[in-house]
Amino acid sequence: MEEFQDQRGINPETTGGTLARCGYPAVAELHGPAGGRAATWYDRDSEVVWFLAFDAQHRYERLETRAANGD
């Protein structure tokens, strides 16, 4: 959660790349030295950054699979 606050405090959209393979080009990747991988999305209209998913195994593929399955 600290990485989420730190990185999205710098830029609400992304400080890295996006996870376009999740089916939504604005879904941003989130990772840091603490480990794990996460996905976020910045809702500009509401000015809210949504924490969408987290995977402790450091695998964005799991997040992409979840999105493809509609999870």
Image (cartoon, grey):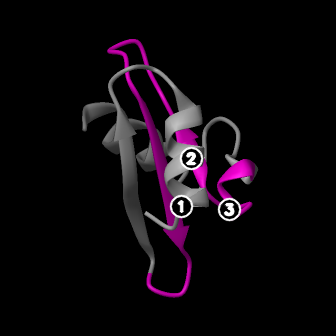
Determine the residue positioned at 36% across, 55% down. 51
Give me the disc on residue 26: 3
Badge 3 density bin: few <14, some 14–19, many ≥20, Cα 10 Å: some
Describe residue 33's horizontal placement relative to residue 43 as left or right.
Answer: left
Residue toward you, 69 or 50:
69
The quadrant of the picture occupied by the C terminus is bottom left
Give me the disc on residue 65: 2
The numbered mark, 3 or 2, whose residue comes first in the sequence reads: 3
- Label 1 secondary element: loop
Q: Amino acid at mark 3?
A: Ala
Residue toward you, 68 or 36:
68
- Label 3 secondary element: loop
Determine the residue positioned at 74% across, 60% down. 25
Measured as percent of width and height from the top left, residue 44 is found at 56, 78
Q: Amino acid at mark 2?
A: Thr
Residue that label 1 marks: 69
Badge 1 density bin: few <14, some 14–19, many ≥20, Cα 10 Å: few
Q: Quadrant of residue 69?
A: bottom right
- The extreme front residue here reads 69
Q: Magenta part of the protein: which range?
A: 21-46
The relative height of residue 66 versus residue 37 in the rendered view (above or below) is below
Q: CA distance from mark 3 to mark 2?
A: 17 Å
The relative height of residue 45 versus residue 1 in the rendered view (above or below) is below
Say if the magenta span includes residue 7.
Answer: no
Q: Nearer the viewer, mark 1 or mark 3?
A: 1
Whether label 1 touches label 2, CB < 8 Å: yes
- The extreme left residue here reads 1
The numbered mark, 1 or 3, whose residue comes first in the sequence reads: 3
Q: Amino acid at mark 1?
A: Asn
Measured as percent of width and height from the top left, residue 19 is found at 67, 46
